[in-house]
Amino acid sequence: MIRVGINGYGTIGKRVADAVRDQPDMEVVGVAKTRPNFEAEQAVERGYDLYAAIEDRAHQFAESGLETAGLVDELVAQSDVVVDATPSGVGAENRALYEEYDTPALYQGGEDAEVADVSFNARANFDAARDADHVRVVSCNTTGLSRLITPLKEQFGVEKVRATLVRRGGDPTQSDRGPINDIVPDPITVPSHHGPDVNTVIPDVDIDTLGLKVPATLMHMHSVNVTLAEDVDAEAVRDALRGEPRLWLIDDSLGIETTADAKEYAMDRGRPRGDVWENAVWTESVNTEGRDLYLFEAIHQESDVVPENVDAIRAVTDADTTAEESVRTTNQAMGVDLGGE
Amino acid sequence: MIRVGINGYGTIGKRVADAVRDQPDMEVVGVAKTRPNFEAEQAVERGYDLYAAIEDRAHQFAESGLETAGLVDELVAQSDVVVDATPSGVGAENRALYEEYDTPALYQGGEDAEVADVSFNARANFDAARDADHVRVVSCNTTGLSRLITPLKEQFGVEKVRATLVRRGGDPTQSDRGPINDIVPDPITVPSHHGPDVNTVIPDVDIDTLGLKVPATLMHMHSVNVTLAEDVDAEAVRDALRGEPRLWLIDDSLGIETTADAKEYAMDRGRPRGDVWENAVWTESVNTEGRDLYLFEAIHQESDVVPENVDAIRAVTDADTTAEESVRTTNQAMGVDLGGE
């Protein structure tokens, strides 16, 4: 069993913990948190050993009636690998801690690429993380783009990608963020940093991205153009994408027309926290004009990187499992079942 | 003086009436409305003769204390040209009325292109409307794209345009419309109808568009990619666009970062109803990657077609005025002063 520690138990950390516990070849050593709140209460409720991330605040957990198993250092020492799911920038500060205990670590996409030896997406570059000690799982948007571009590149050849990322203003609980009733170029400068981030996992693709923020919290929306190497029939593209494990080609007959519909469907299916781990691609939107492919896909910012973190754990610690085997195991254990086989 | 009747006194009609009244060579014969409300009250307050658009409801105006000058037929009979600013689809039904009195008519972009002999944008095809009796002024989004594409086409050559239109869900008063907290592909099928609509005024441009709706009311946002005929320096593009009368290249130093900022600035400048008649182009966003030009522009859906309607009136009725002269006269009279000379 691969012994996994989770440092940071917020939006990503709590989901990774559950996904890791569901795996047949992994166990959760414990989770670390800076302070008590409803998520810490739920960590204990779910049976995870809770570690205090900040020594000076450790007493707050006891004061809130939450038992802790020790400090984060002990968690790191006991783990075969640590998933750092702390807020952007904190992961980089934590690297010294993981090095001190010689524990391999995964970081999230909010960190600069330089925090790690390699950036990771299971579909794009699983093997690049083999034997790496510090691996960055790329962000939700980059994950979504990488899952889409890789099969297109393999099957049809990609001359250029141009994508407009219409991003949710904040997650559902981040109600102190904007925008309200506005459409915000973010960043105003074009192209945005998302394209270069895709290049950290797919170096040889020409991609320009533009970013916007809007008053929504449920999912991001990508308006994607891919100029393919040759004229391709739209149905051939749909068929190719339908075969991909983490691409959900939304069947027109479901009547799923918005990000809210996609989330509602995930909840109706009984998914934990209503998560949509797959890229939600509107099949009806997948069309070609000559070599130009267009489509809309929605990306669930809170969860699409979770199966990627699980795969990254295997890439770093298990030399025998292939990318395909890992993705299959992860998906079956989690219930990532809306994509292809 | 060109005698102009306005049929329909809502979002567009009321603005066109004011813009026409401001012109040195035009006068407003009157405005027609289906029923009394605050806009009808303001029409009378502003001194416009008010005509009843529906005979059966004409008595409602008197009951609301609003004096009418007659029925819409009389307005049409007295006018040299009628601007039809009725809701989408109603314009087509009104065509027979205009034909009955042999009065040339302008329609709005919500109508199908087939309603008119020619579709119109002052920058793209002013002369095409010469001597036409039925002219359609293209929609706000098509107007914005046409103003941008035409100078690029003339100065650099355009190989292909790809644009994602992130559209406001409704106008500020349309608070019964959605979406709320959602991002909606609209239409889901790609490409959208907006590209073909641009082709009604610029036939020979290759353009694909994608449409989305978001929870905002102030302006549309266009994420635009134009593949130019050759490599062009971004500053050369900015210079070319700066010379265009209805393109507002937003100066970085103004700190205008969102559609709300652009609207606030228009209000601070004392513009009627806070209108932004120009395309609001973020100068900082105008960049090139080889032949690929990218930029963000915001489009004020309530007002950008207003100066175009004024120009269309001249194109139809005044054989002596050139496109450039008309645009200059319209802009000076209205105060369209954020664009180039």
Image: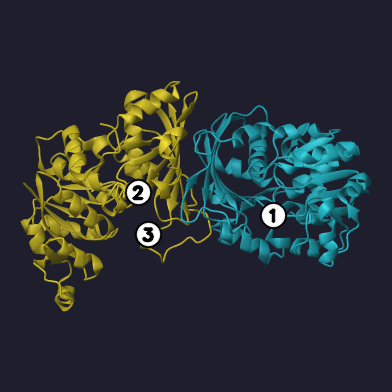
Chain colours: A yellow, B cyan
Contact check, label 3 and label 1, Cβ < 8 Å: no
| Rendered location of residue B80, percent (x, y) | 91, 43
Residue B324 seen by the camera? no
Q: Amino acid at mark 2?
A: His
Report how far apart the C-alphas of labels 1 and 2 lie in the structure.
40 Å
Describe residue B36's horizontal placement relative to residue A284 as left or right. right
Task: State left or right for residue B164 relative to residue A238.
Answer: right
**Amino acid marked by disc 1:** Leu
The chain ID associated with circle 3 is: A
* Cα distance between the residues tagged 2 and 3: 11 Å
Quarter occupied by residue B10 = bottom right
Q: Which residue is mark 1?
A: B338
In the drawing, does residue B212 fall left or right of residue B126? left
Give coordinates of residue A332: x percent, y percent: 19, 39
Q: Secondary structure at mark 3?
A: loop
Q: Residue at x 62, y 63 (%)?
A: B264
Q: CA distance from mark 3 to mark 1?
A: 38 Å
For this orientation, the residue located farthest to the bottom is A63
Discs 1 and 2 carry the same chain letter: no
Secondary structure type for disc 2: loop
Name the chain letter of the residue that bears numbered label 2: A
Q: Camera-side residue: B51 or B236?
A: B51
* Amino acid type, residue under disc 3 in the picture: Pro
Q: Which mark is residue A172?
A: 3
| Residue with the mark numbered 2 | A300
- The residue at 44%/22% (across/down) is A233
Structural crowding at the residue carrying mark 2, measured as other residues with C-alpha within 10 Å and reported as few (<14), some (14–19) or many (≥20): many
Give the quadrant of the C terminus of chain A: top left
